[in-house]
Amino acid sequence: MYAIRPATVADQPAVVALLVRLQADPEHHIGYHGVTAEEVAEEFGRFAPDWVSGAVLGTDDSGAVRAVLSVDADAETGRAWLHGPFVDVPAAHPAGRQVWHNTADDLFDAALALPRLKGIDDLELYGHRRNRRLGDFAARQGFSAGAASRVFTLTGSALRSVLVSAVDAGEGPRVLGAEPAIRAQVVELHERCFPQRTVSGRQLVDGERGHTVVVLTGVDGLIGYAAGFVAEDELYLDYVAVDPNMRDAGAGRALVRSLLRALAARHGARQRAAAVIALGNDASERMFTALGFDLHLELVGYRRK
Ligand SMILES: CC(C)(COP(=O)(O)OP(=O)(O)OC[C@H]1O[C@@H](n2cnc3c(N)ncnc32)[C@H](O)[C@@H]1OP(=O)(O)O)[C@@H](O)C(=O)NCCC(=O)NCCS
């Protein structure tokens, strides 16, 4: 069994190395994390106020880090995202499955006692569809499985052509400005389209979570918006929504293109663009595949309230 303890700043390089190894395997993969050391380190850097005070570890007899669970929480929405549990059990271990589950339970108990989770009772887990131990752990701990989602990515020449193609003349989407009415409409459309949202409409328009927002407006105000951010090597499309009366006319596609360009202009171009789409959201899949996006991986979320 592994000994459980809080993380320290000095542990971070070992934790990043462990995650990079485990993230490469779908049976361990967690949806909140990328796969490179740079991506994981950057994701840790986005935890508020920091990664270290929200992380618990499992160490082996030699003191090496073999397990981790990191918690990112938002007091405003009362939600927390459990990044893990990651447990590294030697492949030949006779009781590997048991060690994984016992360690995961111990990490979870330790995480629940962290000050970061005080007053927060809406918890989420998110892993690869083939991370079956995560599914078993979630069920045992009283989480219910949510809808599966698919990560679509755009790379190479398809991405370059979106970034360099002619900018929509004049009346196309633009970066959200200071206009209070449009900002209020973005908040309203966001909360209507994404009731299970991770980021509130206000946080989105205020850029509190690092989003760039583009909007498309018409004579009656907001038609739609798209919001995303840049992660280490990726332009990430977090949200896109179009007023229900204005759909199926290409607005969604124009917003996605415009957001990718705005992100690249603001932060520099990247090798890849990515978006997560709920399984069954056919309009969204159609919109992204029409832009050249391909299916990259499938993930499942679990939630306990
Ligand atoms: C997804 C969304 C942003 C698309 O906006 P839009 O302005 O309609 O997008 P586009 O017109 O560029 O493309 C939509 C495509 O889906 C197609 N479509 C619409 N409903 C569909 C359905 N039920 N099944 C399959 N395709 C569908 C449209 O015909 C269109 O394809 P086409 O132009 O090749 O005919 C919009 O449906 C929306 O706001 N949905 C709610 C929020 C949401 O789910 N956002 C995505 C989260 S990842």
Image (cartoon, rainbow, N blue to C red):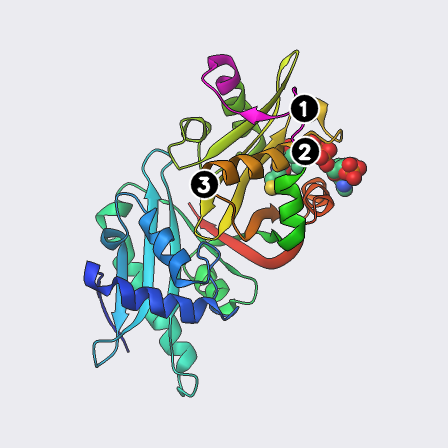
**Label pair 2/1, CB-CB below 8 angstroms:** yes
Question: Which residue shows up at 61% across the image and 47% down it?
Answer: 278
Q: Quick check: marks 1 and 3 in contact, CB under 8 Å?
A: no
- Give the main secondary structure of the magenta stretch: loop
Q: CA distance from mark 3 to mark 2?
A: 20 Å
| Amino acid type at image mark 2 | Ala
Task: Identify the mark at residue 252; answer none if there is no mark.
Answer: none
Q: Which residue is mark 1?
A: 169
**Is the CB–ligand 1 distance for label 1 below 8 Å?**
no
| Observer-nearest of 15 and 299 | 15
Residue density around tag 3, few if under 14, some if 14–19, many if 20 or more, within 10 Å: few
**Residue 31 image position (x, y, % from top left):** 49, 56
Quarter of the displayed picture in which ligand 1 can be seen: top right
Q: Is residue 74 above or below residue 189?
A: below
Q: Which residue is mark 2?
A: 166
The magenta stretch spans residue 211:
no
The residue to which callout 3 is attached is 267
Q: Residue at left 61%, top 41%?
A: 163
Amino acid at the residue labelled 3: His
Hey, which quadrant is residue 9 in on the image?
A: bottom left
Frontmost residue, 78 versus 172: 172
Residue 223 point in image, percent of width and height: 64, 22
- Number of numbered discs overlaid on the protein picture: 3
Mark 1 element type: loop
Could you tell me which quadrant the C terminus lies in? top left
Q: CA distance from mark 1 to mark 3?
A: 23 Å
Q: Is mark 3 within 8 Å of ligand 1?
A: no
Residue 241: x %, y % from top left: 61, 32
Q: Pick out the residue farthest to the right.
A: 249
Which contiguous range is marked in magenta? 167-184
Residue 79 occupies which quadrant of the picture?
top left
